[in-house]
Amino acid sequence: MSNFTETEERQELRRQVSKLAKGYGRDWFVERARSGEKTTELWMEIAKAGYLGVNIPEEYGGGGGGIGDVAAVCEELAAQGCPLLMMVVSPAICGTVIARYGTEEQKQRWLPGICDGTATMAFAITEPDAGTNSHNITTTARRDGDEWVLKGQKIYISGVDEAENVLVVARAEDERTGKLKPCLFVVPTDSAGFEFTAIPMEIVSPEKQFQVFIDDVRLPADALVGDEDGGLVQLFAGLNPERIMAASFSTGLARHALEKASAYAKERTVFKAPIGSHQAIAHPLATAHIENELARLMTQKASALVDAGDDMAAGEAANMAKYAAAEAAVHAVDAAVQTHGGNGITQEYGMAGLLVAARAGRIAPVSREMILNFVAMHSLGLPKSY
């Protein structure tokens, strides 16, 4: 792969995923979301074609590719109006962490199900009182003989209802210092003491958000993923891919909105000519397209750095990509709604439902403000502000 273009193999991957997703489309996706149904049919077809676990090693049922490959799958699904949020979580975050830090037995146990779509895994880090401050996580893990006991709460956890397991970030006490350190545990969703309730959301999505209650959940010793003393290094192995996937989610949504708006602007005639011939319509769409292409390029850079194992540089690039993509998506969807005029806020044209989805990219999985803090500190060397 050169610095600026993707390999023919990845371009072909994009074409095939796009073709598959086009068979479903935005109307199908929204119909499922509004009726409370799941998009399992599309999820399983993506898995069967080998696209779901394309970033996971081949010996565990994956495609043996990199994070850039699974990000491409995510983007092409979103570009066809079928963004699958659990792709960000299951193969990208959980799959990456387990493939990188899990024991051989853990990899054999959990990765094949992630790849073939039969054992989706959710990810739980956010807490009601900690917010974006992951150092304030209060979910604790304590040893009890050969077992671990987890206790705490999580919030805005995606897709718990359709996951067999959840990769939970908790804090265990360091025996030497007495300080709490972050650790990762795979928790079956049917565990005694593990409960969850749906959070009503305005976003049009088949994947629900949940508040999770972990009340003295007992886990075997091998539920711990990675080294108990691995700490933040292991956690960030999953968070850089998460930001890259979120960026691809946003750039795909932006492409979908711009494609719909451009088609409408070429057909809709008000003052003797198609409205797309007027700069007041054309320029916002062109600006949004430029912003989105720049974000896609930064996402490509971040993916290459992750796949090269350069975690520090990847952290900077992944945060920048996620920031740029969310901004581009918000601008693209806003321009698309405006292009449609009154039609932009009808259900028939499907633009208004994209507003909340695009706007969520500025908030999750990490807020734009925290990314600006990160860039100010790590890229510019400015004093820490929080």
Image (tube, helix red, strand yellow):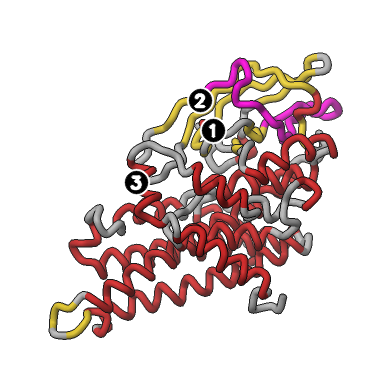
Q: Earlier in the sequence, mark 1 or mark 3?
A: 3
Q: Is residue 184 magenta?
A: yes
Label 3 near label 1: C-beta < 8 Å? no
Q: Secondary structure at mark 1?
A: helix
Q: Earlier in the sequence, mark 2 or mark 1?
A: 1
Q: Which mark is residue 160?
A: 1
| Alpha-carbon span between mark 2 and mark 3 | 25 Å
| Between marks 2 and 3 in the image, the one whose residue lies nearer the viewer | 3
- Give how far across and how far down residue 381 sits, in percent: 66, 64
Q: Quadrant of residue 105?
A: top right
Q: Secondary structure at mark 3?
A: helix
Which residue sits at x=43%, y=30%? Answer: 198
Q: Is residue 154 above or below residue 80?
A: above
Q: Is residue 168 magenta?
A: no
Q: Nearer the viewer, residue 230 or 280?
A: 280
Let me know if residue 203 appears in the view: no
Which residue sits at x=51%, y=59%? Answer: 20
Q: Which mark is residue 31?
A: 3
Amino acid type, residue under disc 1 in the picture: Val
Q: Which mark is residue 38?
A: none
Which residue sits at x=65%, y=26%? Answer: 188
Label 1 near label 2: C-beta < 8 Å? yes
Q: Earlier in the sequence, mark 2 or mark 3?
A: 3
- Residue position for label 2: 196
The residue segment tinted magenta is 170-196
Amino acid type, residue under disc 2 in the picture: Phe
